[in-house]
Structure formats: C-alpha cells, structure tokens
Image: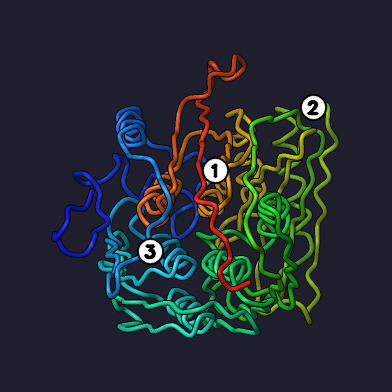
Amino acid sequence: MRRAGSGPPRIHSGGSGFPGGSASSAFAENSATPGVDRSFRAVGRLFFLQQRRCRSGPGPRAPPMAGQRVEVDGGILEGGGQILRISTALSCVLGLPLRVQKIRAGRSTPGLRPQHLSGLEMIRDLCDGQLEGAAIGSTEVTFTPEKIKGGIHTADTKTAGSVCLLMQVSMPCVLFAASPSELHLKGGTNAEMAPQIDYTVMVFKPIVEKFGFNFNCDIKMRGYYPKGGGEVIVRMSPVTQLNPINLTDRGSVTKIYGRAFVAGVLPFKVAKDMAAAAVRCIRKEIRDLYVNIQPVQEPKDQAFGNGNGIIIIAETSTGCLFAGSSLGKRGVNADKVGIDAAEMLLANLRHGGTVDEFLQDQLIIFMALANGVSRIKTGPVTLHTQTAIHFAEQLAKAKFTVKKSEDEEDSSKDTYIIECQGIGMRNPNL
C-alpha cells in the first residue's frame, strides 16, 4: 500500500519472490521440457494463497496524478520478458506512465533483446507514446502512453524472436484502440520458449475470443530458429468492453488431433515418424479415441529456412482445448520430438483443469480488464501465471483469488480455481 507523500508507487515482491524461481515458470523464455515441474511447491503455494487473501479489493481505478509514473521491478517473480509485456500493455490500455527497471534480470542475458525492443516500439507507435531508454541490452525503459489509434503497424524482430510474444503485448492494446488494427509481425513463428503459431491459432484464439472479440491471424510465412523470417498478419477491431469468462466445466475428451511438420531440406519421413511416435505414446493411456495427427511438408514458398515440430490438441465435450508441442533440434531424433509432445499433452489432461499450463497466464490480462467476474479452473499454477496476476493487481487494481478446487472429482488432483473481479475497462477511444 502506498503512503501519501512516499514518492511514486513501486511494484515489488515480499522477500525474494515465490519459491521455485524462474525454473518453475511455463512457456515464454523458459524451457518447456516435459516432466519439469513448472508449478510452485507446497510452501510456495501456501505463500501465494496467503498473498491472494491479504490483498485489498480493486475498487474503481483512480486516474494517475499528473506526472505520476508507476515503477516496475522487472527482476521479480518470473524475472523475464513477460513482466515487460504485461506491464507495457496495461500501461498503454490504462494510460499509466511507466518505468520498468531491472529488465529480464532473471535471465542469463539480462536486458532487452530484439523481440522485446520491436514489441515496445510497436506499442509506442500504436499510441503515439514516448519511449526512452529502449535499446538492445537496456535494463531500464520509460514509457508514456497516449491515445491508442489503431491502423497498420509492423514489428520486425529481425531474428527468430517469437511473433506470438509480439502478439501477446499488442493484442490487449488494439482491443482498446480508436479504429481497427492490422499488425504485421515478423520473426519466428515456431520458436523455442514461446507459443508456436499453431498453438496461438488452434488453442489461444478460440478460447480468448470468449471474452467477446474476434481476430484474424494470417500466416504469410513460417520462420524457424535461427534465421526467423516468418510473418503473420493479425487483424482485429476494437471493443467497447470485454466480457468475463467462466471456464470451470472440463467435460470429457472427445477429439485428439494435430500436425507434425517439416520445412526446408528435412525429409517428409521425419514428420511421419514424429506423428507415429506421438500416436503410440497417447494410445498407451487413451485407447478409445482415434488420434489424428497429420504429417505435413510445409510449402517452400510459405516457410523460410529448415525446421520440424509437432503440436497435438485435445478437445473436450465442453469446448476446452489442451495442447502438447515440441520442436526438433539438431541431434534429437524424430521419435523423441513426437513423444515429448504427447507426454506434455497427457500431463495437461491429468490435472483436471479446463486450460493447459501454457494458456493460464495468457488469459490473466483479459480477465483483469473484463467487466465482471471471470473464473478458470487450472492445474498447478505456474510462475508465469503468478507473475501475470501480481502485475494485473498492481497496475489495473483487479482482484484475484486462487484457491484449491472443491469439486469432488478434483479432490485427489492438483487443481485450482482462479477467480478475478475485472475492472470493467471501457474503451475511451470509441
């Protein structure tokens, strides 16, 4: 709680943050190795739940005082680019001047990387804002947002930096723009330590659209590590307000499908081997469903460079979507890539939640901005989700609670309900 006359509000964490450190986080900028425990341990869980209970309610968001700049410590909790993305997006939407310090302090190469810089510059251009200190390697930036105007904008990482992470920072902003937006995002479409574009289109898109908006994602060119060269075009119109969501009924798994791809010089046999290995792995646990994983050779005019990978989706009777994915690497055989993706999917199906470990944190900012109470059921709460909640509470003043699911079928599982009283953000530009 900020005291009067105590200087600008500072976002901070009690002690050294949640136990588990960055090794516990899921997805962006961290290893997605199946079998790694991305959840926080029992002590960390208790600490996290206590934090949730102790925080005060949201109330209406007071406008910032003239010149007041919110200060964010980019080294706490997840300690990576996610803090920069969520704080910049909320700054832009809410009109909050922002300073982020210790950017990516939890990473082996701290500071801005090309994908973070290009994302920041796109957000600046979206709202004609002011951005200072933004350069490769910089560990501190200040951002002063203005009116979000929409229009056509480009962000080019010039590397294999993830276009999906560019989408994460920009999407909340363009929803509250004055006019429709067209975003040209260039970099890696299927990159390590980030959602694959297939995940974004096949899982994230249908779920996030439940908040009451639609977007179109046109994959012009696929790009892989290390060259990048991919491009997607995202088109979306602004909304007046976001609707809350309620994803608490898991239902039963009705379909399992996916795609195993190769691009460039890699032989088609690699795609077939990945698919076959994944199907064998899934059938050991799920025998009564047909598993339809299509091997795909990406057309040469739609893929830049060489790459291979697989994504497998499970769909339930209530419309829930879960995924497991893996990308090929030099020296890793195709069977292992397929099995890794299958095991990741099966792990996401065991916990009883309605979203997988990679969707949890991506929904938090939309829950915070929505008009009403949103609820999602999850498996173990990831460090990325804890981080998103922390900054959504601090910047947007949304109120979150995280508690163990009391449903009888979840009694023996590590299943949680994340509930948010959204702030009911209205688009001031429409």
Helix, strand or loop at disc 3? loop
Where 155 falls versus 239 (above or below)? below
Q: How is the image coloured?
A: rainbow
Tag shown at residue 234: none
CA neighbours of label 2 inside 10 A, class few (<14), some (14 to 19), many (20+): few
Q: Is residue 392 visible?
A: yes
| In the foreground, 218 or 311 | 218
What residue did someone put label 2 on?
Answer: 287
Q: Provide residue 238's location: percent of width, then percent of height.
A: 66, 68
Helix, strand or loop at disc 2? loop
What's the distance in space between the residues labelled 3 and 1, CA to CA? 34 Å
Foreground disc of the pair 3, 1: 3
Q: Going by the image, does 95 lie left or right of 239?
A: left
What's the distance in space between the residues labelled 1 and 2, CA to CA? 24 Å
Tag shown at residue 357: 1
Residue at x 50%, y 42% (from the top left corner): 421
What residue did someone put label 3 on?
Answer: 63
| In the foreground, 37 or 417 | 417
Q: Are marks 3 and 1 in contact (CB under 8 Å)?
A: no
Q: Going by the image, does 412 lie left or right of 355?
A: left
